[in-house]
Image (spheres, rainbow, N blue to C red):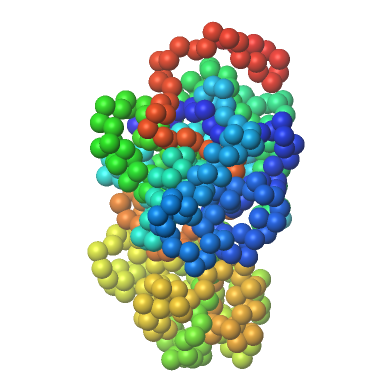
Amino acid sequence: MAIIRPFRGVRYNLQRFQDIGALVSQPYDRIGEELKQQYDALSPYNIVRITLGHLEDVGLPPLSNGNGADVYSRARDTYRQWMADEILVREDRPVLYAYEQSFTVDQHTYARMGLIAAVELADFNEGIILPHERTHSGPKADRLRLLNALQVNPEQIFMLYPDPQNRVNALIRQAIAGCPPDVDTVELFEHDVRQRLWILRDAEVIAAIQREMAPLRDLIIADGHHRYETALTYRNAQRLAYPNAPATAAFNYIGATLVSMDDPGLVVLPTHREIRRFTAVSPAEILARAGQHFSILPVRDLPACLATINAHPKGHAFGFYGGLQVGFHVLTLRDERLIDGLIDGGHSHAWKSLAVSIVHKILLEQVAGVPVQGIEDKSLIRYHRNAAQAVKDVDSGEGNFVFFLSPTRIEDIRAVAAQGERMPQKSTDFYPKVISGLTMLPIGPDEVLEADDAPVAAETIRRCDGLLAV
């Protein structure tokens, strides 16, 4: 069962900052040095000073130099100073948060509803929470050092939960109906996304949401695999250090934004593959080789190419651009039965049928002959959300050719995760990202979350509509 709990979140002091747009950021793994500098310029209190302080310390050793002044302890000291100065404040009681993101994609307007909560960590073999992408050791070592120093989850991971009737969403929307948001802002990078947050303090509302979530299994990590696995490592170490800690010890939990898999605002964008620094096989020869297993259709331009591949019901049509002389083409798999024979290895049919699996295992490795190591270390590949940028790179000579994909479908993500498998890298791009700086979850050894049967505070809790509840 999925256990979620309210928590006494740490957040920016809304009495001091009417708009926290200059304080929030993209998740840490979406931020390079240039974007980090832009966040730094916005405010000395931007959340990146905690989540990514080490980007400004290029050349310094990642571990302590003997006096404790390493990059992670500096993040801890920044956090503590902000708490002391009331830049950050803590909720006076455990709460949940309603988190709505409104945005437009391809002239369609969406509103995605999330629930920010403390989610009990579960090992993947328990079948409660499932990964869908691979992780790498470097980011996990970095995040573990930060977590050990801070003893706080400074960001939420992004999780999906099954709720075909969107019953949890209904409870949330009923609770916030007619209520002005506590936060209403936009973030620098995804500046077209409106970010709104409501603090849910009502005990009855919280209990109702917990009851709906409790029976659920097969929650899927959408974004934040490295942080989740880091939290498991941190939890296990804390359990060894504090064997008598209760089950409600905060280190058994992770801060997460939970979104229904059936939320009408759940959008997955495609990630296109640009191959560069690879000239062993020409784009024209790739098309000729692909003709053995794919039908080849020339199309006039990029919009026509994308429209054609997005119309394929299984995502087994792929765009190809090899430069001005070759033009745009759509490659469609001739026979679905070819998949199992062309992709070997111990993977399920669901995994082999993914568009990203076909691109990597058939088109890139077998047809184009791109070395696998060059894909793994990213020396021969560049990933793009913006298809036009990939075309521009090829036209300028920076890239050799591009494969365009349609978005990975939610049902495919569920099917692969249910098999206990992980998708190839860059299989999904959930848009928009869950931003950092909305709220944090303290997870030190003395932190304990409120039990389900804890008594409701005797004081009254005011709802935004003026009604009172106890």
Determine the residue positioned at 39% across, 28% down. Answer: 446
10 to 316, vertically: above or below: above
Is 27 or 244 nearer to us in this picture? 244
Asked whether, in this view, residue 237 is left or right of residue 323, the answer is left
Q: Quadrant of residue 213?
A: top left
Q: Position of residue 208 (x, y in %)?
A: 49, 21
Is 390 or 285 nearer to us in this picture? 390
Residue 430 visible in rendering: no
Quarter of the figure that contains the C terminus: top right
Q: Position of residue 72 (x, y in %)?
A: 47, 51
286 to 417, vertically: above or below: below
310 to 461, vertically: above or below: below
Determine the residue positioned at 51% across, 24% down. Answer: 94
Q: Position of residue 316 (x, y in %)?
A: 46, 67
Q: Residue furthest right?
A: 18
Residue 369 visible in rendering: yes
Q: Position of residue 312 (x, y in %)?
A: 52, 64
Is 101 or 234 nearer to us in this picture? 234
Count of numbered circles on the image:
0
Asked whether, in this view, residue 216 is left or right of residue 101, the answer is left
Q: Residue furthest top?
A: 458
Q: Residue furthest front?
A: 67
Q: Quadrant of residue 325?
A: bottom right
Is 407 or 333 nearer to us in this picture? 407
Determine the residue positioned at 56% across, 34% down. Answer: 10
Asked whether, in this view, residue 319 is left or right of residue 212, the answer is right
Quarter of the figure that contains the N terminus: top left
Determine the residue positioned at 52% across, 70% down. Answer: 383
Asked whether, in this view, residue 231 is left or right of residue 306, the answer is left
